Amino acid sequence: MSIQAMKRGEASVVIPAFYSVLVFVALYDFVLYGVVPAPISLLGASLIAGGAMILAQRGR
């Protein structure tokens, strides 16, 4: 699936979408196991999400 996404879309759009999976993994980890992510993990997730939003705005 990731190979097809890279063939059809620009890397600057596709790669942040792949990294956004980390945010959902942390959410599932919290919901299922009660594990709270470390502050540095939350910072990294917010940087990834912010970067994806900036790239999406530039694409318009």
Image (cartoon, helix red, strand yellow):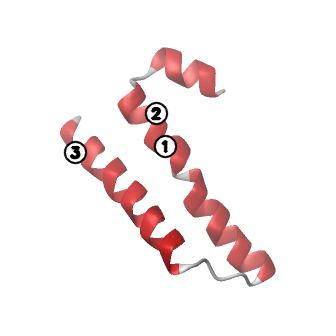
Q: Indicate the secondary structure of the residue bearing disc 2.
A: helix
Asked if marks 1 and 2 touch (Cβ < 8 Å), the reply is yes
Name the one closer to the observer, 59 or 29. 29
- Mark 1 vs mark 2, CA separation in Å: 5 Å
Q: Indicate the secondary structure of the residue bearing disc 1.
A: helix
Q: Provide the residue designation for mark 2.
A: 14
Q: Using a 10 Å C-alpha cutoff, classify the residue at mark 2 as few (fewer than 14 neighbours), some (14 to 19) or many (20 or more).
A: some
Left or right of residue 3, residue 10 in this image: left
Q: Using a 10 Å C-alpha cutoff, classify the residue at mark 3 as few (fewer than 14 neighbours), some (14 to 19) or many (20 or more).
A: few
Q: Provide the residue designation for mark 1.
A: 17
Q: Residue furthest front?
A: 40
As shown in the figure, which amino acid type bears the numbered disc 1? Ala
Q: Residue furthest top?
A: 7
Can you say which quadrant of the picture contains the N terminus? top right
Where on the picture, by quarter, is residue 25?
A: bottom right
> Which percent across, then down, holds residue 11?
41, 27
Where on the picture, by quarter, is residue 32?
A: bottom right
